[in-house]
């Protein structure tokens, strides 16, 4: 995202800044599980370029072998991308075409490639996307959550305090939220999401997309926690979590997830009127809004 805030990068466009003697950098998406998702164009580009810049050469070698492609590979990963970018740029300046691939899906999407693409564009090299699989888009396309506006948050911080702070900052975000998560943190993250966004917020876990054990499970956050807790298989493989954006309760004033959390805790100990008053003085939210939210919570859940 920072790249678009940089006027130097914005100013470079394919049509006005490329040098026709240079090669082209192709940014090539590869499958996220099912090899049949490899596009015909991606195969042609990977066959035709002089060099493939790969996140992990051994991993990509297996993909190339599967499709009978013999193009040489060179490493382009997080640790060497800035320094080694020059090597790929030299080849591109010399007229060779280069393809950039990551281990799975679309390069640069929670994957290396940003520095190379940026350097190439700044050097006047033509950069061409070869689109294909991307886990967040695949998950969103089948989730049944609003897809007209969404925000991709990538991976949450690994440590609980950082993760909870990030989620708190997002609790009134109206767009559908999309997260990548590692399987060993999925349960903790879902629990933190339920605490930050409220237990009833609709969500979906998309696991092992395009693979044998593909699972797309849509439930309110608290129930999704239960589903994952009860079945350890759900804590394996690769996953994307989607959460519906914040919507103000109909006919009522919006109460933040923190306000609801405090209200819920107090409701376990005291009647609604007193809980709403106390929650209002703790959180600074309006007493009446909390009271209305408390009434709504007592009603049986619809739909
Ligand atoms: N560049 C990739 C893309 O286009 O989606 C993402 C790479 S990122 C390092 C890997 C993360 O993407 C995983 O931890 C998981 O959150 C998500 N992911 C990748 N493949 C997936 C799949 N088949 N099913 C579900 N999530 C997947």
Image (spheres, rainbow, N blue to C red):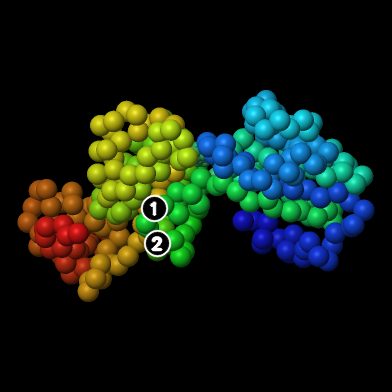
| Residue count near mark 2 (Cα–Cα under 10 Å), binned few <14, some 14–19, many ≥20 | some
Residue at the spot of label 1: 143
For the point 71% across and 30% down, the residue is: 68
Most extreme residue toward the left is: 271
Q: Quadrant of the C terminus?
A: bottom left
Q: Position of residue 141 (x, y in %)?
A: 45, 54
Q: Position of residue 20 (x, y in %)?
A: 90, 57
Q: Position of residue 12 (x, y in %)?
A: 78, 62
Q: Quadrant of the N terminus?
A: bottom right
Q: Nearer the viewer, residue 212 or 264?
A: 212
For the point 25% across and 53% down, the residue is: 200
Instruction: Say what secondary structure mark 2 lies in.
Output: loop
Question: In the figure, 173 relative to 230: above or below?
Answer: below
Q: Nearer the viewer, residue 242 or 96?
A: 96
Most extreme residue toward the bottom is: 251
As drawn, the label of residue 146 is 2
**Quadrant position of residue 256:** bottom left
**Quadrant position of residue 297:** bottom left
Question: In the figure, 281 relative to 241: above or below?
Answer: below
User: Looking at the image, can residue 157 be seen?
Assistant: no
Instruction: Say what secondary structure mark 1 lies in.
Output: helix
User: Looking at the image, can residue 233 be seen?
Assistant: yes
Q: Nearer the viewer, residue 16 or 83?
A: 16
Left or right, residue 205 beside residue 301: right
For the point 64% across and 56% down, the residue is: 2
């Amino acid at each position: 995202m920072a790249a678009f805030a940089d006027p130097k990068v914005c100013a470079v466009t394919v049509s006005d800044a490329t040098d026709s003697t240079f090669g082209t950098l192709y940014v090539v998406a590869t499958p996220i599980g099912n090899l049949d998702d490899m596009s015909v164009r991606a195969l042609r580009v990977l066959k035709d370029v002089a060099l493939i810049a790969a996140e992990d050469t051994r991993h990509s070698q297996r993909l190339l072998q599967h499709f009978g492609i013999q193009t040489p590979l060179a490493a382009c990963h997080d640790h060497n991308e800035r320094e080694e970018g020059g090597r790929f740029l030299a080849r591109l300046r010399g007229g060779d075409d280069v393809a950039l691939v990551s281990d799975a899906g679309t390069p640069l999407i929670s994957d290396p490639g940003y520095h190379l693409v940026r350097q190439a564009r700044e050097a006047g090299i033509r950069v061409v996307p070869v689109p294909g699989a991307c886990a967040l888009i695949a998950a969103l396309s089948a989730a049944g959550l609003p897809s007209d506006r969404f925000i991709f948050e990538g991976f949450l911080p690994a440590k609980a305090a950082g993760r909870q702070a990030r989620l708190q900052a997002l609790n009134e975000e109206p767009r559908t939220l999309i997260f990548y998560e590692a399987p060993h943190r999925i349960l903790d993250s879902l629990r933190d999401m339920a605490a930050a966004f409220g237990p009833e917020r609709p969500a979906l876990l998309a696991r092992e997309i395009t693979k044998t054990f593909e699972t797309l499970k849509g439930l309110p956050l608290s129930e999704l926690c239960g589903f994952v807790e009860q079945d350890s298989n759900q804590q394996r493989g690769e996953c994307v979590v989607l959460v519906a954006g914040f919507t103000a309760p109909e006919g009522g004033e919006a109460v933040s997830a923190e306000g609801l959390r405090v209200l819920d805790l107090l409701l376990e100990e005291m009647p609604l009127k007193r809980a709403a008053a106390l929650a209002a003085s703790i959180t600074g939210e309006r007493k009446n809004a909390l009271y209305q939210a408390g009434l709504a919570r007592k009603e049986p859940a619809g739909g």
